[in-house]
Amino acid sequence: MLILASTSRTRQDMLRAAGLSFTALPSCVDEAALKAGFSGPPAQLAQALARAKALAVAGAHPGALTLGADQLLVQDGRVFDKPTSLDEAARHLRVFSGCSHQLVTAACLYRGDELVWSGTEVATLHVRPLSESFIARYLAAEGEAVLASVGAYRLEGLGAQLFSRLEGDHFTILGLPLLPVLAALRAAGALAA
């Protein structure tokens, strides 16, 4: 049995498209508190968040494999949180305009309280220069859906228009290093090799 310690629609869609059967459960982890008390590089923070999410669910399901994941957006050493309003989303987009940022995506598998696997992948996204009129039109078209994304974009939608170049794995950009996760599931005997 596989449990995804997340209610992320994008992560669920990726796992389903890869042919996996799983149950999605919310982890109810206080991410803000974990971030506030953390000191270290973004990759370690992303991994700590992924592990906290998995452990929050895994204890109640000791026989299952529990998948935890997290993604951080980092630009020039600053870690961004999801925007809480369209005004904040516009401010984020102005900061990203003409610059690159990294998406640091971590995932882990637990069986009970035993760590079975963990991995972190990084993708670099180059945002083209964005005009104020483009940002206004983009946010009007996307609406509050952008508030569900740390970058205020959905690459699989109109957000593709924000970029001049992408470096890294597509799945990692969407929020789950899917190929390493599948390899870990095969190694754990949860998928046929």
Image (cartoon, rainbow, N blue to C red):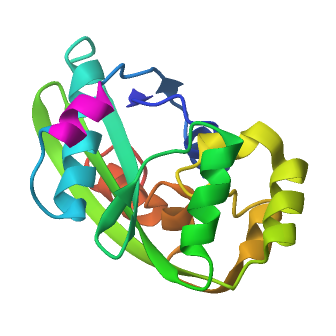
Residue 31 in the magenta stretch? The answer is yes
Q: Is residue 145 left or right of residue 106?
A: right
Q: Which residues are magenta?
A: 30-36
Q: Residue at x 75, y 64 (%)?
A: 159
> Where does residue 46 sit, x and y in percent of width and height?
27, 52
Q: Residue at x 75, y 38 (%)?
A: 144
Which of the pair 73/65 is nearer the observer? Answer: 73
* Quadrant housing residue 121: bottom left
Residue 144 in the magenta stretch? The answer is no
Q: Taking 180 as reference, is 16 above or below it?
A: above
> Where does residue 118 sit, x and y in percent of width and height?
22, 54
Q: Residue at x 51, y 75 (%)?
A: 169
> Where does residue 186 sit, x and y in percent of width and height?
35, 54
Q: Taking 43 as reference, is 102 above or below it?
A: below
Q: Is residue 147 visible?
A: yes
Q: Residue at x 47, y 59 (%)?
A: 178
> Where does residue 65 sit, x and y in percent of width and height?
30, 32
Which of the pair 21/151 is nearer the observer? Answer: 151
Q: Is residue 16 visible?
A: no
* Quadrant housing residue 3: top left
